[in-house]
Image: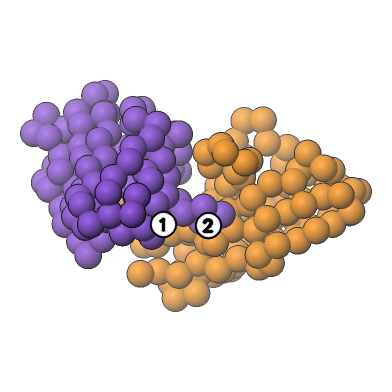
Amino acid sequence: GAVVSQHPSRVICKSGTSVKIECRSLDFQATTMFWYRQFPKQSLMLMATSNEGSKATYEQGVEKDKFLINHASLTLSTLTVTSAHPEDSSFYICSARQGDRAPYEQYFGPGTRLTVT
Amino acid sequence: DAKTTQPPSMDCAEGRAANLPCNHSTISGNEYVYWYRQIHSQGPQYIIHGLKNNETNEMASLIITEDRKSSTLILPHATLRDTAVYYCIVRVAQGAQKLVFGQGTRLTINP
C-alpha cells in the first residue's frame, strides 16, 4: 500500500516558538493532503485540506494564521504551528489522497506528537 | 456526507471472528463505505471500502446489506494486534474529498 511519512514523530517546544511538521507521500504523488488533530481519547478532527500549488482550505474554527499549511509539491506538505501555546499540544496527523479517480483512497502518516511547555 | 452509528466498544476472543457493525441509514447511492482503524498512538490505517457488493482483502471482509443502510466489517481470525479503534465512514466518491471521523468502535481482543 501507499506510504505516508511524517517528521518529526515527536517534538517538544517552548511556548511562543514555532514548529514545522512535514508530511511526505513516499511512493505516490498526492494532489491533495489533509491535516488532522487528535486530543487524548478523542477522535480525529480535520483541520484543513491542501491541494498542491494552491491555498489550503481550513475547517471552521481553525485559525489559518496560526496553523500555516504549505503544499509546494506533489509529495510534500508542511504544517507550521506558529506562536505555539500549551493548548496546541496534541497529536497531529496528515493524510494523502492517492489517485484522481473515485473512490479516492486516503492514506495516513504515523502522526507527530507535539508538546508545548 | 451521511452519518454513521457504531457501538462504542466491543470485545472479542483471540482467534475468533470479530464482527463490527455500522449503521448508515441515510447513505446516498453515490457514497462509499470506508473502514479505517487506529492503533494506539498511530495514524489511522486503511482497511477496506465498498459501494454495493461485499468486498474482501487480506485484512478483512466487508458485508453491505442490500439496502446499503448498514454494513459489517469482519476480521476472520482476530489477533491481539487487532486491538484498535475502528472507524466506519461514508463519503461521496466525488466532490467533497475529506474523511470525517466519528467516535468509532474500540475493539479489544482478549487472549
User: Residue sitting at 51 percent across and 56 percent down?
Assistant: B43
- Dot 1: within a 10 Å radius of its alpha carbon, few (fewer than 14), some, or many (20 or more) residues? some
Q: Which residue is mark 1?
A: B45
Q: Residue type at mark 1?
A: Gln
Q: Position of residue A28 (x, y in %)?
A: 43, 72
Evaluate whether residue B87 shows in this view: no
User: Chain letter for purple?
Assistant: B
User: Chain letter for orange?
Assistant: A
Q: Nearer the viewer, residue A117 or A106?
A: A117
Q: Which mark is residue B42?
A: 2
Q: Position of residue B24 (x, y in %)?
A: 27, 29
The disc numbered 1 marks a residue on which chain? B
Q: Would you say A50 lies left or right of B7 here?
A: right
The disc numbered 2 marks a residue on which chain? B
Q: Nearer the viewer, residue A32 or B41?
A: B41
User: Residue sitting at 22 percent across and 65 percent down?
Assistant: B58
